Amino acid sequence: MIARPIGAAPVRVGLIGFGYAGRTFHVPLIGATEGIAPIAVASSRPEAVHAVLPGIDIMDTPAALIARDDIDLVVVATPNDSHAQIALAALLAGKHVVVDKPFALSLPEARSVVAAAERAGRLVTVFHNRRWDGDFLSVRAAIARGDIGEVVHFESHFDRFRPMVRDRWRERATPGGGIWYDLGPHLIDQALQLFGLPDAIEASIATLRPGGVADDWAHAILHYPGRRVILQASMLVAGGSARFTVHGTAGSIVKQGADRQEAQLLAGMIPGAAGWGEDDDPLVLYDGEQSRGLPTLPGDQRDFYRGVAAAVRGEGPNPVMPHEALAVMALIDAGLQSSAERRAIEPDFA
């Protein structure tokens, strides 16, 4: 069943999954973005859905939601091991598709989804929402201005302090579980946006928490000519690590605190409300003799869904192009291989 032409009407969204990602990110961002509106949710937790979206239609299964003819865009926010399967079914039914990260469990699986979108003539994109974080936007702007000259060392951390292992799918020894699939896509996508495709990746992925069964620590080095990019994620960092540390031929930049949008969403802030995406923690610029603060730009992850709505209407580009999603998956796969074989791996970007 092919979705109707959109025209100027709002893009009608069906959300599949109402766990952390669906409830915390997708629902509030979609609800606060003009030109796009939720129509139905597929979830096994109707009470939880209606507590947030009173009166919305709830479907028992993903298939039932996909079969509706009043859905233009399907948002897949389910456990990672079902992303590709549901995306393929939605594309086959003629829907446009947003997939939460990771795009799939492997590069071949991701390529099959992209091929299905091409056959169907439908948009497929990945929720790399961290492109619109204020900390990243500020660091990118400083690099583009030449504030520190040519970058030679870039370090990006997504660190948490969660010493107790929780019984949830993200922390189980299951396909798609663990920190590399959870936070690795964000770290990799941001690096690729800044520096393009690396020559190789050298990764170490481990389980360090007592009682842990899924990886909860990851360290990766992306190799570029004359530059190294370090990506780090851990569940055992109580504090002290900077979000970004960047060294260049003319100076250094440090951004200590992380973007606040996730914390604001968890606190119940409506995207776009006063203070949304604002961050009073500055970048600090060092020139070898002194330091000075640079204001952090505001972030706004609604820009992802603004871009999706425009792309579905044919009014703008896909905000995360399929080839960009495939490049991230190539590095996810290569990072796993690198860690297992303890050597640098050239990713399959072909």
Image: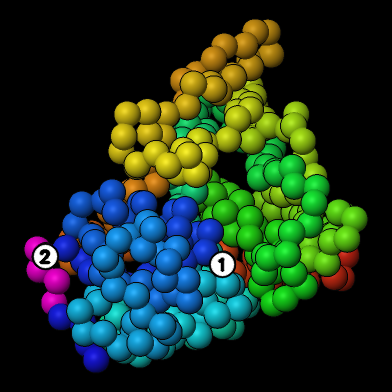
Q: Is residue 296 left or right of residue 94?
A: right
Magenta stretch holds residue 6: yes
Farthest top residue in view: 290
Could you tell me how many numbered marks the image carries?
2
Q: Are marks 1 and 2 in contact (CB under 8 Å)?
A: no
Which residue is at 28% across, 67% downward? 56
The numbered disc on residue 102 is 1
Which residue is at 29% across, 54% downward? 31
Which residue is at 24% across, 75% downward? 72
Query: What secondary structure do most residues of the magenta stretch adopt?
Result: loop
Q: Earlier in the sequence, mark 1 or mark 2?
A: 2
Residue 162: where, in percent of width, then height?
A: 75, 47
Amino acid type, residue under disc 1 in the picture:
Pro
Residue 129: where, in percent of width, then height?
A: 45, 52
161 vs 268, nearest the viewer? 268
Which residue is at 34% across, 42% downward? 271
Q: Nearer the viewer, mark 1 or mark 2?
A: 2
Give the extent of the magenta segment. Answer: 5-9
Farthest front residue in view: 47
Name the image quarter holding the C terminus. Answer: bottom right
Query: For mark 2, what is the residue?
Result: 9
Q: Secondary structure at mark 1?
A: loop
Farthest left residue in view: 8
Q: Judge whether 47 appears above or below 196 on screen.
A: below
How far apart in space, not on screen, are marks 1 and 2 (Cα)? 30 Å
